Structure formats: C-alpha cells, structure tokens
Image (cartoon, rainbow, N blue to C red):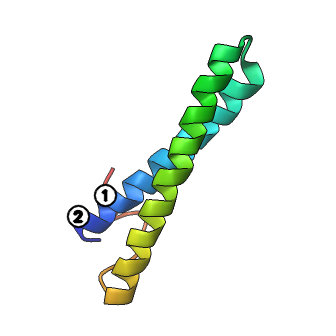
C-alpha cells in the first residue's frame, strides 16, 4: 500500500474510533456539556469519514489503491 493510501486508511480507522468514543460518551454522559462535546465529535467524525471515503474512491479509480495482507500492514 502506498504511503498516501495508508494514511487514508489510518484516517478511516481514526474516525471509526471517534464515532465509538462519541457513542459511548453520549450513553455515559451526566450533563448537557458532554452531550455537546460528543455531538461535535460525532459530526466531525462523519465529515472526515465522508472526505476520506471520497479520496479512497479516487485512488481506487486511478488504480493506486492496493489492499494489503494483515502480515504486511504497517502499524
């Protein structure tokens, strides 16, 4: 996987974690301020996810995006 593609994949992984934290935080929150925080986190994650998915699609269309096996994936 090219470094630029690897960074897109890392972004997609990051937004998945952002959404998970927002959902868990929203369930466990005890005040309105936390609700606002987790709402902004969730909204931001979905916006970033949309951008990263569009960029991934462009790379796929150009033939740049190559999936890699679990053994060769950089951490």
* Along the viewing direction, whichever of 60 and 49 lies nearer the viewer: 49
Q: Residue at x 39, y 82 (%)?
A: 60
- In the rendered structure, the answer to whether residue 33 lies left or right of residue 30 reads left
Give the residue number, with chain letter if any, for mark 2: 3
**Label number found at residue 36:** none
| Other-residue count near label 1 (Cα within 10 Å), few / some / many at <14 / 14–19 / ≥20 | few
- Identity of the residue furthest to the top in this view: 30
* Disc 1 to disc 2: CB gap under 8 Å: yes
| Other-residue count near label 2 (Cα within 10 Å), few / some / many at <14 / 14–19 / ≥20 | few
Q: Position of residue 55 (x, y in %)?
A: 38, 70
Q: Residue at x 31, y 88 (%)?
A: 62
Q: Residue at x 61, y 29 (%)?
A: 38
Q: Position of residue 39 (x, y in %)?
A: 63, 33
Q: Position of residue 7 (x, y in %)?
A: 31, 57
Mark 1: secondary structure: helix
The answer to whether 60 is drawn above or below residue 13 in the figure is below
Mark 2: secondary structure: helix
Q: From the image, which quarter does the N terminus lie in? A: bottom left
Q: Position of residue 11 (x, y in %)?
A: 40, 52
* Along the viewing direction, whichever of 53 and 31 lies nearer the viewer: 31
The answer to whether 64 is drawn above or below residue 5 in the figure is below
- In the rendered structure, the answer to whether residue 2 lies left or right of residue 19 reads left
The answer to whether 49 is drawn above or below residue 72 in the figure is above
- Which quarter of the picture shows residue 40? top right
Number of numbered labels in the structure image: 2
- In the rendered structure, the answer to whether residue 30 lies left or right of residue 36 reads right
**Label number found at residue 7:** 1
Q: CA distance from mark 1 to mark 2?
A: 6 Å
- Which quarter of the picture shows residue 18? top right
């Amino acid at each position: 996987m090219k470094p630029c593609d690897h960074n897109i994949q890392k972004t997609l992984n990051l937004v998945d974690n952002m959404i998970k934290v927002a959902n868990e935080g929203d369930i466990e929150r005890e005040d309105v301020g936390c609700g606002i925080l987790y709402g902004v986190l969730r909204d931001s994650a979905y916006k970033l996810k949309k951008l990263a998915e569009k960029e991934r699609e462009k790379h796929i269309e150009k033939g740049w995006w190559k999936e890699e096996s679990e053994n060769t994936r950089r951490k």
